[in-house]
Image (cartoon, coloured by chain):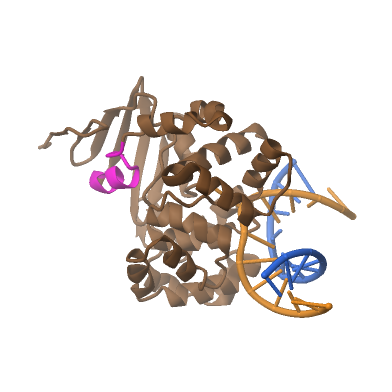
Chain colours: A brown, B orange, C blue
Amino acid sequence: MRLKVYIKKMSDYYFDNNRIIFDSRGYFDIADSLECGQTFRYAHHSNYSELMSRDKKAILYADGGRVIIESSDCGYFVRLLDLDRDYAPLNQRAAKFPELRERAALSKGIRLFNQDPFEVIISFIISANNNIPRIKKIIGKICEFCGEKIDGFYAFPTPKQLSHLCEKDFSDLGCGYRSRYLASTAAKLSDGYFIDNANTLAGSALRKELLTLFGVGGKVADCIMLFGFGRWESFPADTWIVKCYENEIGIREKAAVVSRIYSERYGDIAGLCQQYMFFTERGKSK
DNA sequence: ATCCAGGAAGTCG
DNA sequence: CGACTTCATGGA
């Protein structure tokens, strides 16, 4: 028997035990949200996409203007996909910045996911000086190597599971010189205390704390703040963002400077603006 | 072959 | 401090 619950929120969706259905109104594009660089555990198929997070998996597809999400834990994906937030006013605010007007229109369907901090920390340590297809491949191999096998896929390893890997294990999985960063940080996160405490910290203190992790520098810390801790004031500046700034201003600045300038300019929606910028800039060359 | 990929750590001045 | 070099790996 299916319990059908109608939940009145800014973003209206039907929600039962194994499906979420809602009208996207243009503010949830499945492919764009998966490909904008915030997550690496997804795949596209002819008629649907699949997304994995922790030990959860969902099937996502569009039917006209509706989005349908199937999962054995819909509550988890309501939270992950940020479905209780209305993105229309946020997108409109971003579009008021002249340099973002066109990018905001192209990125309307991007939502920021509320991901697991541990998974984000490990994933973005791997992302350093790496390319996205290879990042996806490495993360997939790590899941296969030590994540729990669920029906048809492998979960992301728990902190405890990952802490059992040594540097050579990571190296054998293709992590390259990041292997010792991963072994060190996995050990430090194994008991969950670091992340529990991190959740209580204000922005600047959290960033400082993240920088103590081996393999986490400024840019990766900003990604972790945004994608893992929901801190929208952070604006990760990578090579693509630095290019955006250079095109806009005509001067090439270091990533840390670019990050500060943009985060101050865009304030509490900086992270969303960053996704718009990254997605459209990277999309140009694909 | 050379360069690049969502950079960070190590070293030197 | 700031600037410069090194670090695996794989695809273009």
**Membership of A40 in magenta stretch:** no
Q: Is A159 situated left or right of A130 in this image?
A: left
Using the image as rendered, state which of residue A71 and residue A221 is in the foreground.
Answer: A221
Using the image as rendered, state which of residue A128 and residue A206 is in the foreground.
Answer: A206
Query: Where on the picture, by quarter, is residue A147?
Result: bottom left
Q: In the rendered structure, which segment of residues is drawn in magenta?
A: A74-85
Q: Quadrant of the N terminus of chain A?
A: top left
Using the image as rendered, state which of residue A224 and residue A207 is in the foreground.
Answer: A207
Q: Quadrant of the C terminus of chain A?
A: top right
Q: Is C5 situated left or right of C8 in this image?
A: right
Residue appearing at x 50%, y 55% in the figure: A223
Residue appearing at x 67%, y 36% in the figure: A248
Query: Where on the picture, by quarter, is residue A22?
Result: top left
Location of residue A216 with respect to A99 vertically, above or below: below
- Give coordinates of residue A187: x percent, y percent: 45, 77
- Give coordinates of residue A175: x percent, y percent: 60, 64
- Give coordinates of residue A131: x percent, y percent: 63, 51
**Membership of A84 in magenta stretch:** yes
Q: Is B10 situated left or right of A4 in this image?
A: right
Location of residue A192 with respect to A246 vertically, above or below: below
Residue A211 seen by the camera? yes
Residue A37 seen by the camera? no
Residue appearing at x 37%, y 27% in the figure: A62
Location of residue B3 with respect to A165 vertically, above or below: above
Using the image as rendered, state which of residue A98 and residue A241 is in the foreground.
Answer: A98
Residue appearing at x 48%, y 47% in the figure: A38
Q: How many marks?
A: 0
- Give coordinates of residue A20: x percent, y percent: 25, 35
